[in-house]
Amino acid sequence: MKKILMSAIVAGSALASLSAAHADTLGKIADSGQITLAYRESSVPFSYLVGPSEPVGFSVEIAKAVAEEVKKQLGKPDLKVNWQPVTSQNRIPLLANGTIDLECGSTTNNSTRAQDVAFATNHFYTGTRLLTKKSSGIQNYEDLKGKNIATTTGTTNFQVLRRYDREHNLGMNILPGKDHADSFLLVETGRALAFGMDDILLFGLIANSKDPSAYEVVGEALQVEPYACMLRKDDPKFKELVDGVINGMMDSGQFATLYDTWFMQPIPPSNVPLGLPMSEELKKNITEHSDKPAT
């Protein structure tokens, strides 16, 4: 027992030392000569792959802007920029253990996650809705009573849907996909009648599907949540840099231009526009620069 206890103490000390060592992100980057940015493989239009090369997307452009500012502040124009794929499940552990330095994707800023990580200024607002085939007859959550619904493991949507199912006694069978593409495939192949996820991601998946005309997004939004870039806790210096980049983009008009590029204009790979105007919540945050989490 004493041996086990001692092992736990050593492991805990090692973890504490690791966390402390990674709290100074700018110092870590300066020492290593590289910054590692996270990306998602199928979070259209925020962060996704269009081939085997670098990721593209709205959030990817924000991450690149942060990397440029890091180069400037550290005086390292040749700083190496690495890209690391992450999933809904591993993004927080990989940030906490120092594998990645910044995650700008489609991550909801909420108070539960804020116990483990920090968030920059909110850059999008969305809510859980349903993607379904137009031929399915599904129009709302009640239509899914006793039926299969897909969602992605490790997302806030998984918890939102479970709570809604429990509160309304629907008996839905929630099928977990390992990522958004996997969850969409469950609907595409008929194994699930709907996919519950942030509405903007659903619109992105439809726009880039084999047959966009076959799908639609239905149902009311169950909640409104902010997206924000994620960084390590207790690192005010790096948060100030990341916030400064995003706030500066918002103040200069660059953010609005970037939004138009990825939400209103044709985007790769299908060159289909999402046609999603900026929400009132986001317009407000362009002036407020809030990093307030979802309740």
Image (tube, rainbow, N blue to C red):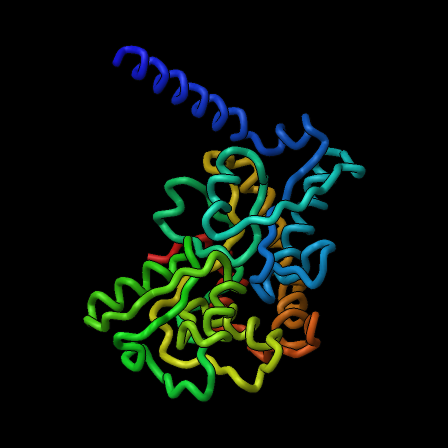
Q: Nearer the viewer, residue 210 or 31?
A: 210
Is 254 left or right of 153, judged from the image as shown?
A: right
Q: Nearer the viewer, residue 50 or 227?
A: 50
Q: Single out the residue that lies furthest toward the top.
A: 2
Q: Nearer the viewer, residue 185 or 100?
A: 185
* On screen, residue 3 above or below 100: above
Q: Nearer the viewer, residue 23 or 88?
A: 88
- Is residue 251 shown to the viewer in this render? no
Q: Quadrant of the N terminus?
A: top left
Which quadrant holds residue 292? bottom left
Which quadrant holds residue 247? bottom right
Q: Which residue is pictured at 45% across the width and 67% down the height?
A: 198
Q: Which residue is pictured at 50% across the width and 69% down the height?
A: 184
x and y percentages locating residue 81 in the rendered image = 72, 42
- Is residue 49 shown to the viewer in this render? yes
Please count the marks in the image.
Answer: 0
x and y percentages locating residue 167 in the rendered image = 20, 67
Is 270 left or right of 115, judged from the image as shown?
A: right
Q: Single out the residue that lies furthest toward the right.
A: 78
Q: Which residue is pictured at 58% across the width and 40% down the height?
A: 100
* On screen, residue 80 above or below 286: above
x and y percentages locating residue 243 in the rendered image = 56, 48
Is 224 left or right of 279, judged from the image as shown?
A: left
Q: Quadrant of the C terminus?
A: bottom left
x and y percentages locating residue 76 in the rendered image = 77, 34
